Amino acid sequence: MRITERTDADLDTLVEVLWRVHTDGYPATWPDDPRAWLCPEGLLGAWVAVEDDRIVGHVGIAVPGPGRMPEVTRLFVDPSHRSRGLADGLLDAAERFAPGPHIRLDVTEETPAAWRLYERRGWRLTGTGLADWSKPSGETPLLRFYAKRVG
């Protein structure tokens, strides 16, 4: 496994990986423009996980607006490549790059494997609340908010 800085040339392959991840539930709603979705406002950096010369995962760090805390965003791993330490490697890259002293992330309550990963890595639950988006069913998911000291 290698973690490398993402390039624009990676985006088409990442959209394909994202589609496979989406069939497993993330993101809840397929974006109108998945390439743009991979490049959210305030993106500071992004990395890809490469295994057997194939891109199989992604993570980014973004500051979503003025005065906001940096956040881990767009973390995903191809379902056929999970449980191999790829998410850990991607989070390592994001945590090393993130401007300190703290970073944040949120995750849905219904994805315990994801929030267990964050808790195992020292992320602290800071609260819960309803998302500002809805699933295709119209349901508004409950989010778990996490923070970690990195600087």
Image: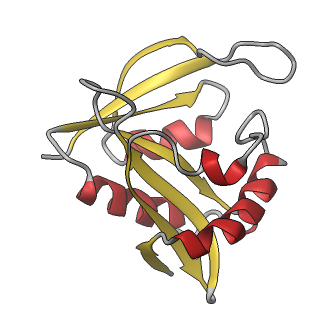
Judge by depth and name the residue closer to the eye, 111 or 120: 111
Residue shown at 49%/72% (left/top)?
A: 7
* Coordinates of residue 94 in the picture (x, y in percent): 35, 56
Quarter of image, res 89: bottom left
Q: Position of residue 57 (x, y in %)?
A: 59, 64
- Up-down: is 54 above or below 32? below
Q: Seen in the image, is 130 located left or right of residue 68?
A: right
Q: Determine if residue 79 is in view.
A: no
Q: Residue at x 40, y 39 (%)?
A: 119
Give the image quarter of residue 143: top right
Q: Where is 84 relative to 106, above or below?
A: below
Residue appearing at x 62%, y 45% in the figure: 37
Q: Is residue 68 left or right of residue 30?
A: left
Could you say which is closer to the camera, residue 33 or residue 104? 33
Is residue 141 rendered to the left or right of residue 42?
Answer: right
Q: Is residue 25 above or below residue 55?
A: above
Which sits in the foreground, 55 or 119? 55
